[in-house]
Amino acid sequence: MADDGNNIDSGLFAIALSDSEDDTTAANGCQAGSGAKEGGGAAAPRDRTGQTEEEFQAMKASYRAKVEDGEIWKNVKMPSGQGRVPKHEGQEILHAVEELYFYRRYEEAVTFIGRVMQGAEGEEEGAGDGLDGDLRALLRTYETRCRVRLVSWGAT
């Protein structure tokens, strides 16, 4: 380090770069450039799927796409009030409210939010229905927006 600053052995720039393919062939006991690909022998393909073709076809045959037709709120699991609501369930509640708002079904959205928030008023963060503070605030924002839209529609 005391020399002219051109010491490349200091470790700062001693980064070993390699190709992942080289690493896997070395791990399998083959050497890169040994002629396995070039010569008569073909390299064995790696199994990247983790399932057989039969398992894939069985899964493909049983798969049904989830089609949402504007009625997410009918199938949403309501918070039970015991413990925190898992993030995916909270997201499903939010998607249901967003869908009702998008389709301009404001009165249904206000009713749905009221059912979701039941028991949450006056309780501290995370208590009652188990919704986190951000989700609760976002639901209240949608409720306010829906009420404003209902009032503006009633005025025209």
Image (tube, helix red, strand yellow):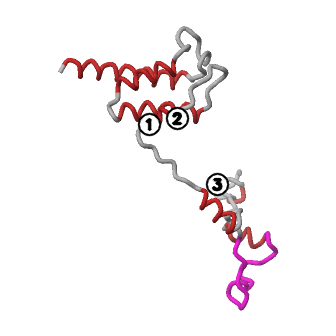
The quadrant of the picture occupied by the C terminus is: top left
Task: Name the side, left or right, on which 87 lies relative to 67.
Answer: right
Q: Amino acid at mark 2?
A: Asn
- Residue range highlighted in magenta: 27-46
Q: Position of residue 43 (x, y in %)?
A: 71, 80
For marks 1 and 3, give the one nearer the viewer.
1
How far apart are the alpha carbons under marks 1 and 3? 68 Å
Dot 1 alpha-carbon crowd within 10 angstroms: few under 14, some 14 to 19, many 20 or more: few
Q: Pick the residue in front: 13 or 150.
A: 150
Task: Name the side, left or right, on which 127 lies relative to 99.
Answer: right
Q: Which residue is mark 2?
A: 75
Q: Which residue is mark 3?
A: 5
In the rendered view, tell whether residue 144 sits above or below residue 69: above
Q: Pick the residue in front: 31 or 142.
A: 142
* Membership of 40 in magenta stretch: yes
Q: Amino acid at mark 3?
A: Gly
Q: Residue furthest right?
A: 29
Q: Pick the residue in front: 145 or 103.
A: 103
User: Residue at 34% across / 29% down in the picture?
Assistant: 105
Q: Which residue is mark 1?
A: 71
